[in-house]
Image (cartoon, helix red, strand yellow):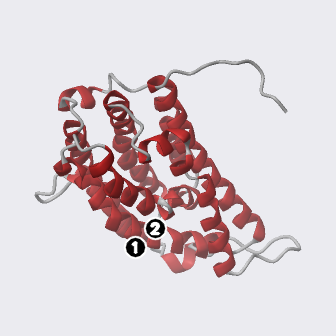
Amino acid sequence: MIKTKENLLHLATVSGEEKPFPKAEFERMLQEKGSSYHIYHPFHVMMAEGKLSKKQLQGWVANRFYYQISIPIKDAAILSNCPIPEIRREWIQRILDHDGFDGDAGGIDAWLGLGEAVGLKRDVVASLELVAPAARFAVDAYVNFAKNATWQEAIASSLTELFAPHIHQQRLDTWPEKYPWVDPEGMKYFKYRLGQARRDVKHGLEVTKDFFSNSRALQDRALEILQFKLDVLWSLADAIMLQQCEISVLGSKQG
């Protein structure tokens, strides 16, 4: 029998004494995780305030390229683990968005264009020679999670897209003033993702609420997974900051 969304999405059963939160409340709890989003990381705050040097902004673009090329690999892992055709048909659009199709060069190519816009050579960004080891480690941790987790868990980890439109819009709003030397044409990646992220999160959120709302334990697990992904992005920002900024080691923290 062909497996369908209806006969697989609700396989989890209610367990334990605590009832699951209503879906609306569960969504609110997921949204609250946005307080840990990397838009609040010191490096990203510096970026929004126009305090990064040209070299630092170039370093961010070069390091984040490793994340960009890993996204379709992560999504392919989800597809390989998902037995439901209708979910695969919708999820595959994410790979096409990044890898390109039918004359659309895709998000990865657009990010290379961003590299050119900040003054980097395209082949230098693509070579990954500027990527910090800790940045690779953080991104690889996310990809490996998606490969080894259930497809439902891997989909839940994608829900940092809930918060992505804000950070993309922030860059579109601040970079022209703060970094006027950046070629505006190279910022089209952020424009693309404004719509794509909203579309993607609608689907991912629906799947996550449907499956994980079968029990309180599953809802707690989804919140843990989303926090893991937020930690990955924060660690990636840590790696970039350590590579691009002078850091003073002052000893143990006070208090």
Label whose residue precedes the other's in the sequence (2 or 1): 1
Indicate the secondary structure of the residue bearing disc 2. helix
How far separated are the C-alphas under marks 2 and 1? 16 Å
- For label 1, the crowd category at 10 Å Cα-Cα, with few meaning under 14, some 14 to 19 and many 20 or more, is few
Whether label 2 touches label 1, CB < 8 Å: no
**Disc 1: which residue:** 86
> Residue at coordinates 48% horizontally, 25% vertically from top-left?
245
Q: Nearer the viewer, residue 24 or 84?
A: 24
Residue 251 x/y as whole percent: 74, 18
Indicate the secondary structure of the residue bearing disc 1. helix
Q: Nearer the viewer, residue 237 or 155?
A: 237
Q: Is residue 9 above or below residue 189?
A: below
Residue 240 x/y as whole percent: 47, 31
Residue 139 x/y as whole percent: 48, 38
**Disc 2: which residue:** 201
What residue type is disc 2 on? Val
Residue 171 x/y as whole percent: 36, 53
Quadrant of residue 101 in the image?
bottom left
How many dots with numbers?
A: 2
What residue type is disc 1 on? Glu
Q: Is residue 23 above or below residue 241?
A: below
Left or right: residue 174 compared with residue 104? right
Q: Which mark is residue 225?
A: none
> Residue at coordinates 28% horizontally, 58% vertically from top-left?
97
